[in-house]
Amino acid sequence: MCSLAAALSVALGSGTLAADVKGQQMTGTVVECPLGYLTIENSKKEQIMFNLGELGDQRYQPKVGDRVTVYYDISQRDHLGRPIVHKIEKAEKGSKKN
């Protein structure tokens, strides 16, 4: 019985760690925000377009020039391969997360 509990604990723990690895975040400046999408430029001057399909009832609406942090899951992409954002936050000045 103890072996079963230990095996189950390890199995559940590794599944949780694997799920956490997929979560990503990126901070950058909004360069474009057409309806349903968001393009940000990071500190390396790379521009990445995100799909805003999973935001739900989020109140913050980014504007061109805002510095934001987007949270997304690398395993979830739209039909064109763009990452689907789950959350957007306005980044603090001086934040350099990528």
Image (cartoon, grey):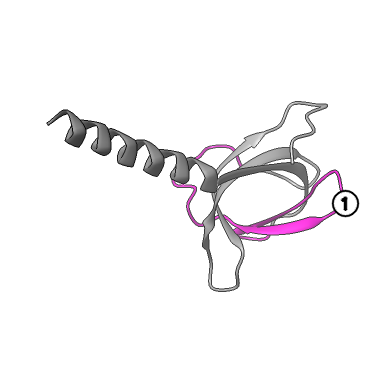
Q: Residue at x 67, y 33 (%)?
A: 90
Q: Is residue 52 magenta?
A: yes
Q: Is residue 76 above or below residue 61?
A: below
**Residue 86 seen from this side:** no
The total number of labels drawn is 1
Q: Is residue 94 above or below residue 75?
A: above
Image position of 15 (left or right of 74): left
Q: Position of residue 51 (x, y in %)?
A: 58, 59
Q: Position of residue 32 (x, y in %)?
A: 76, 56
* Residue designated by label 1: 45
Residue farthest along the left direction in this orientation: 1
Q: Which residues are magenta?
A: 34-61
Task: From the viewer's side, name the closer residue of 10 and 57.
Answer: 10
Image position of 55 (left or right of 49): left
Image quadrant of residue 8? Answer: top left
Q: Is residue 35 magenta?
A: yes
Q: Position of residue 95 (x, y in %)?
A: 78, 29
**Residue 65 seen from this side:** yes
Q: Residue at x 83, y 27 (%)?
A: 94
Q: Residue at x 49, y 47 (%)?
A: 55
Amino acid type at circle 1 is: Lys
